[in-house]
Image (spheres, rainbow, N blue to C red):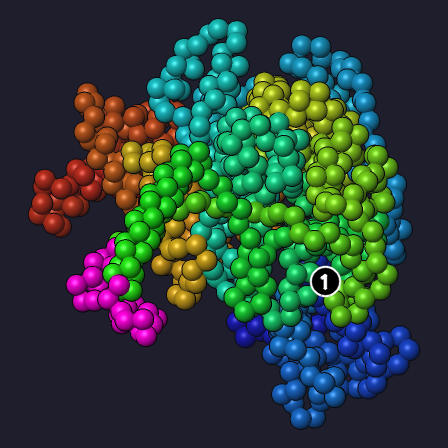
Amino acid sequence: MRFGSLIVIVVSVLVLPCASWADVEVSTEEIRFFETSIRPLLVDKCHKCHGADKQWGSLRLDSRETILTGGDSGPAIAPGAPGESLLIRAVSHTDDNVKMPPKEKLTDQQIADLTRWVSMGAPYPASAAAKGKYRDPNHWSFQPLQRPAVPLTQNSTWGRGSLDQFILNRLERENLVPAERADKRTLIRRATFDLTGLPPTPDEVEAFLQDDRPDADERLFDRLLAAPAYGERWGRHWLDVARYADSNGLDENIAHGNAWRYRDYVISSFNEDRSFDQFLLEQLSGDLLTATTDADRHRMLVATGFLAIGPKVLAEVDESKMRMDIIDEQIDAVGRAFLGLTLGCARCHDHKFDPILTADYYGLAGIFKSTRTMDQYTKIAQWHENPTPTPEILAQKAVHDADVAKKKETLQSFTEKADGLVKASLTPEQAVPEKLEDRYPDATKSELKLLRDELAAFEKLAPVIPSAMGVTEDAIVDVAIHIRGNPQKLGDVVSRRVPDVVAGVTPPQFAATSSGRLELARWLVNPEHPLTSRVLVNRLWRWHFGKGLVRTPDNFGMLGEQASHPDLLDWLARETMRQGWSLKALHRQILGSSVYQLDSRANHDLIEHDPENRLFGRANIKRLEAEAIRDSLIAIGGGLDRTLGGSLLKVKNREFFFDHTSKDLTDYHSRRRSVYQPIVRNNVYDVLLLLDYPDAAVPSGDRVTTTIAPQALLMMNSDLVASSSTEFARDLLAEPASDDSARVIRAYEIALGRVPSRDEITESLQFVGRISDAVRQAAGAPEQHRQVAWESLCHVILNSNEFVYIK
């Protein structure tokens, strides 16, 4: 086939209409964007003339099919090509022949939204009503938690506990046999990366291999769960859900200079095994909880950063719109993080898929409008920060304030004496001069000045009271429905409330004297709530196994998937609450199970019958996340800085990043763990970005894993991998190994957690020899040839799939 013909075919595929637009898959993010930004715009600005009742120019814009079919002038859009789309030209008023709307041009933001929509392929979610599942209140996730009995199995020896019984029972019903148990090397590498995000050291591997005690596995898990690295690893998972970032992003990329306090709060909460119900209460209402110590008060105020760290359009000139946009972002974050629901889709109309009404949305909006997130909306918008002083700083401030008071007394006393001298020198007819320079004689003027300057300088030395992004109470209000999301078009006022579909579990009563965040949080952690515990245990399962029991961890609504093991999901949810919402207890239950310890290799029948491993009959092979890859590279190079907490920002709080690359924020050369590297929303560090770091503007509990060419180029050519290879080789050559074969074995043990085969040792030594000879001949520098040759071997090992994938 000629290349020109191929182009014609590809272009035809791109621009020709699909057989059925309803069959096109639409992501959750695309649905949310369409429902909040596009559908309301089409309804408000277009449907009057291009809807069901009237079609000027034979054009309808109220369905995907009619938009693509177009009218007298042809198709309205070319999906993926806004520049070729008649609709975009019309709303931009760039074509004199067609300008829509004809009397009033859309705003720049509305045009940008339409352009973005067409660029992403013009997603237009199909009506769930046509599929018979539109806003079904009987959907499985809205039903009360069940109390399933642990099922019986034919094989009575395979399982290690109740969790395994659910998995095995399902496999046996399909006449399938699970894979064999993974070997001990595989298990320690899997568990160490799972719990700490770092590779096990050769000494740790060897100690586990030699431990033949019956509880060796449990000892391993307990050691890993007690390590500070556990909180860093699992805190990072939650930071994905919390849409954490160190900059605002969007229109004005301003430094979240104190967001790191929330990040450190999350890490310490995981390390301390803070119960998840308390963790949730603190993040939504920490400022309203009773604290018994200053440390508790400090922690709870920092925790409310969850509601504050989301992106905001800080240059928005319409204060009412800006405020409602922030509230919308908070509702969306709470809905996705804790309920697995896209509540934000009901801002402009009843949710198109889930049984969430617009009134439900504005019932929640009243809670967050009664909450202060911003201290100032106009001129220079400024988010609220809660003061979080430590006892030591408060003591320092008290001493400083006392010293200031003494200096003021000294100045006052001197001033009074000086004024007395001035008055004594005046005749009765003369008045005391108002100006300082006229009042005092030259002899006293300089010494006053000295005292005043000294006081002013000393006052500037006052200890800075630390603060953290967070929220507090505001004027208590109920919110009117915003018709089509427009804050200028108001409907009925809705009392603060929670969505009816899940309100059956003792709906909270909201007092007139508080925002209702505490009542909302307590309702969420009610043991009979159908969603919170289900969503939680599914998140942990997904982070351990690579896929959740519900494969859409951020969406338990109508567009989400059914649970593969609904009884197990409910059993885990109830068991977790029974154990006090302890995440470490849930970890131990999962890690100690037979299903977690399965090998990734399986028999033919199992793979053929369950190719996607939805029954969990074998282990999933998982690629490490971006942070684990980076941290492992630095750790293997021997240079990982294990310092905990603190900030690496190089700019001040609320400072603008005028450099669009945001290189003034940080140079990313720090050897600290990746969780401490600043996250710039409009310019994520390229190593993280290329390895599938999620969008920090929205909650994400299900990172995608892509395989693209730039990832291979990154591993082959980046300074990070090159420097790690150099340091790795230097350490190997410095070790007192008996010979180079021992060095090869050591390299495999450090990087891959295993001993190489004889063939691998032979091939590695031959490779080192060839590189060494080539360098010696080309550079004429025999003293460098061994270092360069071993660097090359280390580079190859670090570029292997085995290094970045966990079996």
Residue 691 visible from this viewpoint = no
Which quadrant holds the N terminus? bottom right
Which quadrant of the structure image shows residue 54? Answer: bottom right
Viewer-closest of 42 and 705: 42
Residue 638 magenta-highlighted: no
**Category of crowding for the residue at label 1, using alpha-carbon neighbours closer than 10 angstroms: few (below 14), some (14–19), many (at least 20):** some
Viewer-closest of 708 and 520: 520
Q: How many marks?
A: 1
Location of residue 151 with respect to 649 vertically, above or below? above
Location of residue 89 with respect to 688 vertically, above or below? below
Residue 440 magenta-highlighted: yes
In this rendering, position of residue 573 left or right of residue 228: right
The residue that disc 1 covers is 36
Viewer-closest of 786 and 549: 549
Residue numbers of the magenta segment: 424-452
Residue 354 lies, in percent from the top left, at 81, 50
At 87% from the left and 55% from the top, the residue drawn is: 129
